Amino acid sequence: MYLIIKNTYSGFIQLMKPLRQYFLIIGFISLVPVISSPSVIAAEKPLRNVADLRYGVVLYEYFQGNHFQSLTELMVAKERGGIQGHKDNPELIEGSLSLAFGMERQAGDIYDRLLGEDKPLAVRNAAWFYLAKIRYQRGELEAVKASLGNIVEPISADLVDEMQAMKIQLLIKEAKFEEAETALENVSSGSAAGQQFQYWRPYLNFNLGAIYARYEKLDKAQNFFSKVARERLSKKSFFHKEQLALYDKAYIASGFSSFQQEDYQQAINEFGNVRQSTPLVSDALLGYGWAKAKLGDYKAALVPWTVLSQRPIADDAVQESLIAIPHAYLQLGDTARALDAYARAEDVFIKELALIDEAGNKIVDQSLIELFKLDSTNATYSWLVPENNYLVEPVSRYLLPLFAQNRFQNSIQSLFDLHQVNFRLEAWTNSLDSYRDLMDYRLKAFRVQQLPEGYRDMSSELESITAARNELAATFNQAKQERNVFMLLDEDRQDVLGMVESGERNAELLSANGQNIDVEREWIERYRGLLLWSASLDFDDRLWKVETDLDEIDDILASAKNADNKIQSLITDAPNLKSAQTRIDDYSSRVDVLLASNKAVMASIENSLRAQLFTALALQRQRVQFYLGESRLAVAQLYDNKYLERSKP
Amino acid sequence: MKVLKVLSLLCFCAFTGNAALAQTASPEVVSPEVSSPEAVLQQNSSALNQDVEDLKQAALNLNRDLLLLEEELLFPGNTQVAVFVSMDVGEFFQLDAVKVKIDDQVIGSHLYTEKQVSALYRGGVQRIYVGNVKSGEHEISAFFTGKGPQGRDYKRAAKMTFEKTSESALLELRIIDSTQKLQPIFEIKEWELP
């Protein structure tokens, strides 16, 4: 009988379990879409082009869950003048990234800063909303309400759904059933907003059911669990794993609720809807058996319990099934089979106790990094991956309930984050050693290339040569354009031209003095004509020659400038190299200090996790010991009864 | 009934992590190093969270400084060239891989995971290469492979000549959906330093 009562209590536990799970789920979901939310990338959704490449790089890392890398990219960009052209989004994203990387205080500071400035309404609304989320995570419900109260119309369509969900969740947390119910109903499923709200509705319905169950309003609880469960039947689309798990929980909760209300047939129907493939099926099988037993059909109860008893023994439902089976045999009057079943249970429980001790030893002896298989080469650690993949046997068998606890999750997430930090710092240690060698080499090279005695700055000479070259180029271009042959004469012809021009001047003087110079003028014109004719003949050759000369001058100038640049960089590099060496030494010290602090904090987290692991193991041990004691007691009582029967005269 | 109470409390403890009950549990698996761990942890939890956050902040600051130093040492602006990959909504092209050459030398290639492609679709930009080239004219060419319209194998290339000056050269390989041509367009854009 105690088993039945215990099982009834277990029903309550089952009702509470999904509620806790919901907080886990909502906590997770509320973080994930922060950055992808169009409200954050307000002006640029869909983001087809970035205005600043660095912003795109930040997003690329973030969308892959590489929070550390993404935050670093953002900080480097900030150091180099900040991200341009994306309004306040970089700052909002920094807040979201900080939140996702477990830096709540930093995220809160950023949002506070945004709210302290004169920012557009959309930015202020987003900042208030994410502040509300931070406060929700901290459990500061009044502060959450205050933050949400600061959000004013018009509210971005993408914020509305989650904000409404959060408001309803607050009412549920405060056990304001009717208000929560009304608020949930008011989000009409027929409206556009209601359609978008469909994602949140099952979770809120489930939580309403859970809170009603906690306050023993079982008919109401049943109603809401059924709503969630029926929704599954009405949907034909491919379900998300997480939603399927929620539906299973709803069926189980609904089943236990029916059981509490002594509607055992209904309970059987509800338990029967739970998927066989889910780990939650253990609770359904146990409940199904007890509902059958309540209807007096112990033979039928044995079917799910026998199936259940073959499952891993770490599950408390399986442990209970091992005791329930002989109990059913006794009810059926089959004492021999009951004794066998008790003997098997005793054997299983003893082995289980040994495994628990082995798990305890592993926790003491093994690094938790190894125990949880934390791989520092992975940038992300997702809770959506089945938990067992992350744990070393046999420890994993006992820790599923722990994984549903926020504190445990946070601790292990912090351990993973710091393990990654450790990995990066150690990598930097190696890089810094290489950079130190590189600087030594460069400094040595600099000393070899010490400037020779008598070195003088050639920069001004190079400038005047460049100016002369440009003048020549201008003459060349003009001559080419105007086909002015006299502009590109060689030296001999320039002399002849000089003589012609001198003769012209003299002829003008003589003419001014009244002398007849017609013959001289004719000669001078003839010479000028001859000169023009001869210069025209090789004008194209001259053009080519000057152009080639200009190219040669350009090459020489480029080479001279290159040499000069090298000398200048040598001069300027010397102090830079020394400064880089100093920075390398400084950063090396910082890496060493941080590595030491990191290891110390990791050790503290490991202690915290170990404590939680030991607590879980101790409870498991206590439970198994209890079942072991009960099975032994039952066997003793059976023998006592038999003995008493025989002793009767 | 006593048994019942114990059992009930045990079950409750299993889901609430009740500290007091935890201490009454069997001591046989308690760590020798951590005595009454739950109570101590409750007190220190907040301080530990602060430590973790401080440490993360310090690590981020240091990582930033080191990245800046590394870039100055290995890729100074007068020789630096950085190549990025971006992608439009990806309706007409499903990216598998990119190979990049500068002056006919392969300088980078990448085979994309589903997660990385998704990050590109959502507006992320991948920095595929950072390196050094001499001042002057260079040619960059990029080869994109993936699935094109109607899921067929698709391989396209794009190339561009750029002038390396004393400023960092920033080149973006862009995959854009052309709604007019109903096929992807591949182009290279040179950015000016912000």
Image (spheres, coloured by chain):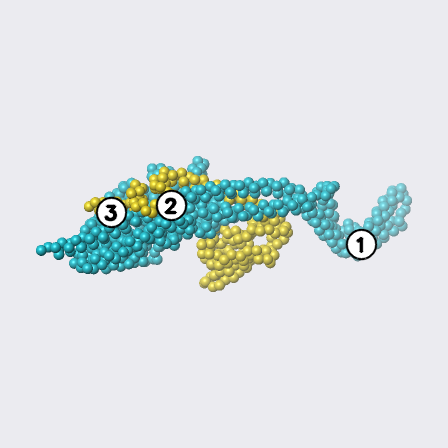
Chain colours: A cyan, B yellow
* Kind of residue at disc 2: Leu
Closer to us: A633 or A501 = A633
Instruction: Report how far apart the C-alphas of labels 2 and 3 lie in the structure.
Output: 25 Å
Q: Identify which residue, A642 or A552, lies in the foreground.
A: A642
Please indicate whether residue A613 sits to the left or right of residue A294 in the image: right
Q: Rate crowding at label 2 as few (under 14), some (14 to 19) or many (20 or more) other CA atoms within 10 Å.
A: many
Write down the residue under mark 3: B7
Residue A109 point in image, percent of width and height: 43, 38
Q: Residue at x 60, y 47 (%)?
A: A438
Kindly indicate whether the residues beneath marks 2 and 3 are on one polypeptide chain.
no
Task: Specify the subunit that label 3 lies on.
Answer: B
Mark number for residue A100?
Answer: none
Quick one: A358 or B150, which is closer to the camera? A358
Q: Residues within 10 Å of mark 3 (few under 14, many from 20)?
A: many
Please indicate whether residue A555 sits to the left or right of residue B57 in the image.
Answer: right
Query: Residue at position x 33%, y 53% from top?
Result: A355
Q: Residue A388 vs residue A258: left or right?
A: right
Residue A369 location, x and y as percent? 42, 49
Amino acid, disc 3? Leu
Query: Which is more toward the observer, A423 or B89?
Result: A423
Between marks 2 and 1 in the image, the one whose residue lies nearer the viewer: 2
Q: Which residue is mark 1?
A: A535
Q: Residue furthest top?
A: A116
Residue A422 seen from this side: yes
The quarter of the image holding the C terminus of chain A is bottom left
The label shown at residue A609 is: 2
